């Protein structure tokens, strides 16, 4: 299985539909085309994280609700209403959106390399602070109800 296969799989599409129902105010455009450049980027990131599409599929099956919680917490924390000071418009999410979040979730589970090193490889500004913030979100996502 490659990433493109995962993105078009029935299991992943079902995951997106259910994820969307948990992300009030964050719609998905499941009809958006799969962008080759984004697939290549995510495949590169998956290589850094030492995670396979099969492992991500297993993750969304085994920790479905927990990954919903994690993604919801991150979107709540980092998305700015009305575009924020930079006036960035939040378009409906596409098929690719959860992949980066799932890679991070995978790394928080200590399934691959250190999250901070991964974040540095993908050139995330403030990697150490971001890793600490998302570690808290990860711990909360694994133990609280989706409505919290």
Image (spheres, rainbow, N blue to C red):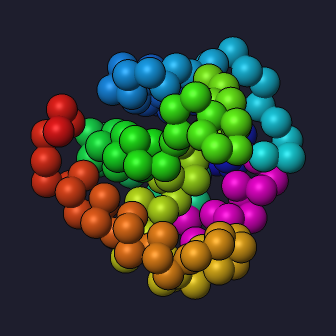
Q: Is residue 43 magenta?
A: yes
* Left or right side of 80 for 37: right
- Residue 48 in percent (x, y) is at 65, 74
Placement of 4 over or under 107, stated as above or below: above
Q: Is residue 98 visible?
A: yes
Question: Secondary structure of the magenta portion, mostly?
Answer: helix
Placement of 127 over or under 100, stated as above or below: below
Front-most of 83 and 7?
83
- Residue 64 in percent (x, y) is at 31, 41
Quadrant of the image containing the C terminus:
top left
- Residue 53 in percent (x, y) is at 58, 52
Residue ID at (50%, 81%)? 128
Residue ID at (41%, 60%)? 105
Placement of 13 over or under 111, stated as above or below: above
| Displayed quadrant of residue 123 | bottom right
Residue ID at (65%, 72%)? 125
Q: Is residue 147 magenta?
A: no
Q: Please give the range of residues in magenta.
A: 39-51
């Amino acid at each position: 299985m490659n990433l493109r296969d995962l993105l078009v799989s029935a299991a992943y599409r079902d995951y997106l539909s259910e994820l969307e129902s948990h992300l009030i105010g964050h719609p998905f455009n499941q009809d958006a085309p799969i962008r080759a450049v984004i697939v290549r980027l995510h495949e590169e990131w998956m290589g850094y994280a030492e995670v396979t599409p099969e492992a991500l599929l297993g993750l969304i099956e085994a920790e479905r609700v927990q990954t919903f919680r994690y993604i919801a917490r991150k979107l709540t924390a980092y998305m700015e209403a009305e575009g924020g000071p930079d006036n960035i418009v939040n378009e409906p999410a596409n098929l690719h959106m959860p992949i980066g979040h799932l890679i991070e979730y995978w790394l928080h589970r200590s399934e691959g390399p250190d999250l901070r090193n991964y974040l540095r490889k993908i050139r995330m500004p403030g990697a150490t602070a971001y890793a600490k913030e998302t570690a808290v979100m990860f711990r909360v996502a694994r133990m609280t109800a989706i409505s919290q």
